[in-house]
Amino acid sequence: MTVDKQTEEKLIALLKQKINRQLLYYLDICARCAICRDACHQYVATKDVHYLPAYRAELIRRIYKKYFTRTGRIIPSLYEGKEITDDLLDELYKVTYACTGCRRCMFYCPFSIDTTWVLSVAKTILIAAGKGSPILTELADAAIEKGKNIDLFKGIMLDILKDTERKLQEKVGDPKATIPVEKEDSNLLYVALSGEHTILPAAIIFHQAKENWTLSLFEASNYGYFLGDTAKAKTIAQRIVDEAKRLKVKEVVVTECGHAHRVFKFFYESWAKEKYPFQVSSILEIIHRYLKEGRINLNSKYIKEPVTYHDPCQIGRNYGVFAEPRDIISQVSADFREMNPQREKNWCCGAGGGVVAQPDLDEFRIKTGELKVKQIRQTGAKIVVSPCENCRLQIETLNEKYNLGIRISSIMDLVAYSLLIPREQS
Amino acid sequence: MDWFSFLVAGVMVYLAVFVFITGMLYQIYRWLSVPKTNVRLGIFPKPKSKTARLLKLAKDSFIFPQAFEIDRKMWFFAILFHFALLAVFIGHLRLIQEFSFLFNILGNKGVERFAFISGGSMGIILTVALLYYFSRRFKSPYKDLSVPEDYLLLILLMLVVTMGNHMRFFGDVRVADYREYVHSLFVFKPAFNLGLSVSLSKYSLVAHVFFANLLFIYFPFSKLVHAIGTFAANLIRSE
Amino acid sequence: MAEEIKVDLELNLKGLLCPLPMVRVSQNIKNVPVGGIIKATATDPGSLADIPSWAKSTGNEILKSERIGPEIIFYIKRIK
């Protein structure tokens, strides 16, 4: 059934707004060769055409042809140009919110078509039609709500941080070690995730490197970005940008969280139409910098078990950090093994793009994680290191469901633990 | 020239050239009139220098090595098809002016033989590649992805190539006669000379030109704009 | 005081990291009637701010939250 006239007009006007040159290229030039077939882990695992990258984008292309091209208006059937119907929106929902945004299809496409860029348009339309992912909407709204009421929560958060701080002092053996919050003129603002596991190891590393740092009150993750709602995504990220400006920090450091890397490095400035007065870096780059400058020294090759590294798509292919984590791992590990394929060709873990937060995709992500399982098994590694919370949650699920018998670690944990060994041994 | 030939191999050629050129210009204008997003959409690792970026662009656009890694069969036929197309295009330039350097080396007979072998084999390669493209469209998942445009273009291409092959393998007309026809187009007095008029090849020529005209007319409004769009899109890859 | 709250559904969210505690609560709130109460036990300290924020933005109500050792317990009332 076609959506009502008013909705149709609204959606088309919105689509028109979203059109940019890159999108036009992507919509106009796809040859439907489907070379992307074997690039997408979801298609490979399901053989369902809905998950073929070219098909996902084709759904938007059909709307575009019908409403935005001359020939498509005259002879829509030539391109299967389609009016916006509820069925089409439902199909769009299925292909769009399942996409992990890994952009492996873009890597292999002969024209480098960025399917996720096309799908970001699909998300805009879905949201406007009242069909955005409900759970991602709730999570995004919760983050915005937290931003609005930060003074209400600050007390509780500082209270929890006291616990973490005590642990830090104990671990590093320094009763004066602190986890500074809202400290002006710090060198860097560290943006963690909610939860101690991303704060404590970083605090240990910063303490050992004698860094002048401060912890952000907000978490790096951005469900507005996953939802595809630019306004919400901007509001969520802005909490941190404002904080960084207020504290006059030189550098904003993003924790091991894939999509946050991309949001802060590539998206926010465009959303907000402004230039940062600070730098954005990955915690991996910071750790690597400390090692190079000799500010921290790792306990050499203390891990004897075989270790492998999973390149998070948003940190490798889509952000460009490949060498640093490998360098760090091989300093502490005697037996580092690469996955095959790796780096820019690495398979997605299967749960990026907000998939991990959508319960109706739980089975799907376990099924489509089979390629990752195979890769991990092939390495024979006992420890899988990955600097993305999303990837780690997924690999932990896979570990459980496929009985991989592995342990999963962040880079920060490896480093922090390595830093502490000499102390614990003495 | 009979009236039908005059319409198809004369008037329609001008129309096709006109539509093709204005259509492509319109398409480029359409692209350039829309602002780019300033989100950098590139993927890593990115080439470091400007030269490296251009080299990568050329590599990605002309031989798309990444596709080779995951779909060798399709890559093979795509490369075959596109390079044969390029060769055939160059071959057709002989209808404007004889390649004198070849003529000097090989002599008259030699050039004819070379043209027969190269043109003939390219014609066969194109046919084979098109048949592969076509058969692929009938299998899942390609079938579910394909739209009428895909079949239409393949059919048009096949008709053009088949008619070309027909002239190449069964024709009894010499290159000079075709060249005379092409020259007549240039001076806006389209005509077939006597040799061409009385030959059966006239019919395959008219059909060849007819389908080629249709292809050129549709080109700017089809996915074939990837012929130029690929450079723009592949450049975004390293932004 | 805790005994006075009549709980319709208990959720064990121990060991779950953000965003999963919120996701599970959101999923399960549909399983209690309007006016019903969920008792959710989490260990992720982040949920101390996350769950109340979620409740506020979805229009549900946190009746009470308490910390017992590493455990954080929420009593969430479904309002709509």
Image (cartoon, helix red, strand yellow):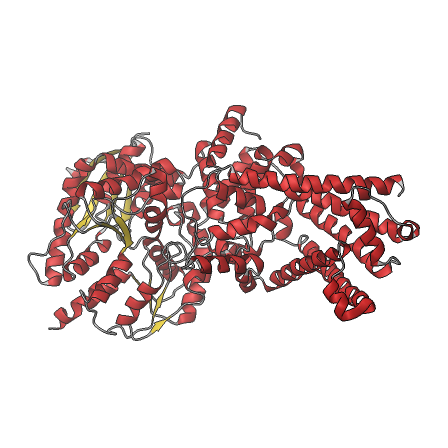
Please, is residue B5 above or below residue A86 in the view? below
Q: Quadrant of residue A401?
A: bottom left
For image coordinates 79% across by 39% down, the residue present is: B11
Image position of A206 (left or right of A255)? left
Q: Quadrant of residue A310?
A: bottom left
Residue A53 locus on image (x, y percent):
53, 50
Residue A52 is at least partly visible in this image? no
Residue A156 locus on image (x, y percent):
16, 42
Residue closest to the far right? B198
Residue A392 locus on image (x, y percent):
34, 57
Q: Quadrant of residue A201?
A: bottom left
Please, is residue B231 above or below residue A415 in the view? above
Residue C50 locus on image (x, y percent):
25, 42
Image position of B28 (left or right of C67)? right
For image coordinates 23% across by 55% down, the residue present is: A197
Residue closest to the far left? A175
Residue A176 is at least partly visible in this image? yes
Image position of B184 (left or right of A420)? right
Please, is residue A400 above or below residue A333 in the view? above
Q: Quadrant of the C terminus of chain C?
A: top left
Residue situated in front as seen by the camera: A336 or C65: A336
For image coordinates 69% across by 39% down, the residue present is: B19
Q: Quadrant of the N terminus of chain C?
A: top left
Picture mark count: 0
